[in-house]
Amino acid sequence: MARYLIIKLQGLFQAWGGHTFETYRPTELFPTRSGVTGLLGACLGLRRNEKEALANLNRSYSYAVRRDKSPYLATRMVDFHTVQNVRTVKSGPKETEITRREYLEDTSFTLALWQSEKAAYDLDRLGETLQQPELTPYLGRRSCPLGRPLFETYLLASSFDEALRAVDPGSGTIYSEEKPTQNAVAMRIRDLPIAGSRQFETRLVYVYVAGEGAHDVP
């Protein structure tokens, strides 16, 4: 049996940034590792310039996330912002540019975190700080406030899949760093933070559907 920290991410909008393309700022379909580490870091009171502490935090846990099954159809919303000093590939920075930003709307996620060996931040510390955050947490972007408290519970389970099934609604699409016992589709995602920079490496994520409709993998 292993111990899991269960986190709920609910809000009107969420944005878990994928690879950006200058003026196009897409969102992934689930919370990225860089986004989860940033969320936990904010709760711990870590600043962006505390690179060593953030790297230690990122090495302290593994996680699986379920995009919860819902009677409502989750959608992507697009918003437009005028920003200054936008980086471009061909002509250098522009003084002003209109950027297109994606958000997930009416989406709920359940995360199961488990502790790594020699973790700098254990599950108890993370659970406590989720309930009393040092800095204001948000769901990927500052314009995406929380719709409910982050902390859900601690669970003992034989696997992350069992832990997620024990939390309502019990079904949905699961994205996991650890290979599950079920058949799953492996995909690469570029969201693994590189210590000391704002660049990212790729990692494997295993995708499958648990609960009702488990034969379908989107």
Image (cartoon, grey):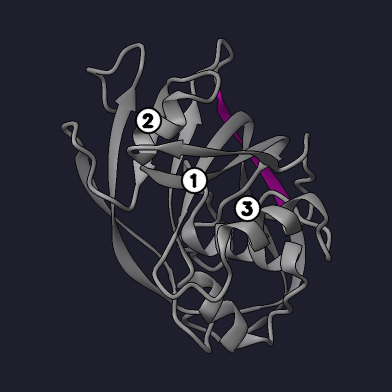
Left of 177 or right of it: where is 113? right
Question: Which numbered disc covers residue 100?
Answer: 3
194, above or below 65, in the image: below
Question: Which numbered disc covers residue 162?
Answer: 2
> Identity of the amino acid at label 1?
Tyr
Quadrant position of residue 125: bottom right
> Identity of the amino acid at label 2?
Glu
Quadrant of the rendering where the N terminus is positioned? top left
Q: Which residues are magenta?
A: 74-80
40, above or below 164, in the image: below
Quadrant of the rendering where the C terminus is positioned? top left
> Identity of the amino acid at label 3?
Arg
199, above or below 8, in the image: below
Left of 40 or right of it: where is 90? left
The residue depicted at 46 percent of the width and 34 percent of the height is: 66
Which residue is at the far front? 1
Mark 1 = which residue?
Answer: 4
Is 75 magenta? The answer is: yes
Name the N-terminal-most of marks 2 and 3.
Answer: 3
What is the secondary structure assignment of the residue under circle 3? strand
Q: Position of residue 178 (x, y in %)?
A: 28, 51
Q: CA distance from mark 2 to mark 3?
A: 39 Å
Name the N-terminal-most of marks 2 and 1.
Answer: 1
Closer mark to the observer between disc 2 and disc 3: 2
The residue depicted at 55 percent of the width and 73 percent of the height is: 57
Q: Position of residue 43 (x, y in %)?
A: 74, 62
Mark 1 neighbour class, 10 Å CA radius: few under 14, some 14 to 19, many 20 or more: many
Left of 20 or right of it: where is 185? left
The residue depicted at 37 percent of the width and 30 percent of the height is: 162
